[in-house]
Image (tube, coloured by chain):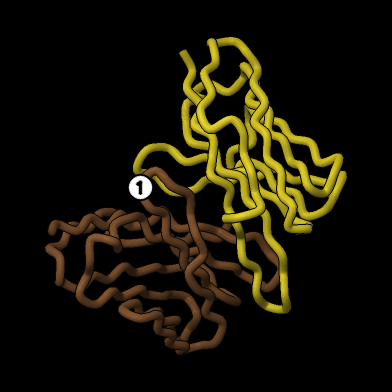
């Protein structure tokens, strides 16, 4: 079945440093989504990417979808303590199929 | 987020007992999901339902059961057959608009087996 892998599992940064998490799928995806879960909270939808090579930005967050639609990345510029949490990618193999979540990258930011 | 409620927030269960977790949504979403999350782990799909009166097993359905008698409700029963039920349980619902399906999660229920 479809597998979605994320690296790294954990990342510790100093406030102000950049952060990147990578997501790789075993199959070509129709779209990929990113979610953020704050400590003790529940996942919250951030963004969806659909097109090959697509790049989207949300303030300090930059999301990319690979040309082959099998990988994606989330980059945070100049991290802040409010960025703390676990970031999940989730991929759909074909439109209408089940969403498969990666294991997440847990980000801690030292002030 | 908003419109999905799960109760209770914390639940304690004695070994050997069945327990039912509630999930209600007022978003008029067709699809609903149950996930299990263990500390420091990702989300594992237990069951999902794409329409009323129909549901499918996810990746870790053993020891769990669900029903979908109403569009807004998708309760999960953790049975005594579930060997290690202590975990954080998340319910989600979703709606599809063209190629986009976004899942909205409830606040979760933390189940602790005593």
Residue B60 percent across, percent down from the top left: 58, 38
Residue A64: percent from left, percent from top: 40, 81
For the N terminus of chain B, the quadrant is bottom right
| Quadrant of the rendered image containing residue A76 | bottom left
Q: Is residue A96 above or below residue B98?
A: above
Pick the front one: A78 or A2 = A78
Q: How many marks?
A: 1
- Mark 1 belongs to chain: A
Closer-to-camera residue (B4/A27): B4
- At mark 1, the secondary structure is loop
Chain B display color: yellow
Vertical order, B4 against A78 (above or below): above
Disc 1: which residue = A39
Colour brown belongs to chain: A
At a point 35% along the width and 81% down the height, the residue shown is A59
Q: Nearer the viewer, residue A20 or B106?
A: B106
Position of residue A101 measured from the top left corner of the image (x, y, whole percent): 50, 57
Left or right placement of residue B92 versus residue A86 in this view: right
Query: Residue, x 41% and y 75% (percent of image)?
Result: A72
Q: Where is residue A93 drawn, in percent x and y?
A: 60, 69
């Amino acid at each position: 079945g479809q597998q979605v892998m994320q690296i790294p599992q954990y990342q510790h940064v100093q406030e102000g440093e950049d952060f990147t998490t990578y997501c790789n799928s075993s199959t070509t995806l129709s779209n990929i989504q990113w979610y953020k879960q704050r400590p003790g909270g529940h996942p919250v939808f951030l963004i969806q990417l659909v097109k090959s090579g697509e790049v989207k930005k949300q303030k300090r967050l930059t999301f990319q979808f690979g040309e082959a639609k099998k990988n994606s990345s989330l980059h945070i510029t100049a991290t802040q303590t409010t960025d703390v949490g676990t970031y999940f990618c989730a991929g759909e193999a074909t439109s209408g199929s089940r969403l498969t979540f990666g294991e997440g990258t847990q980000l801690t930011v030292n002030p | 987020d908003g419109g999905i409620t799960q109760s209770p927030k914390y639940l304690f269960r004695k070994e050997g007992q069945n327990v039912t977790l509630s999930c209600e949504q007022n978003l008029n979403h067709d699809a609903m999901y149950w996930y299990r999350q263990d500390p420091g782990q990702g989300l594992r799909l237990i069951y999902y339902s794409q329409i009323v009166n129909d549901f499918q097993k996810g990746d870790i359905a053993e020891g769990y059961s669900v029903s979908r008698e109403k569009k807004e409700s998708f309760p999960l029963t953790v049975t005594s057959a579930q060997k290690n039920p202590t975990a954080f349980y998340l319910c989600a619902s979703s709606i599809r608009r063209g190629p986009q399906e976004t899942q909205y999660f409830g606040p979760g229920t933390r189940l602790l087996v005593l």
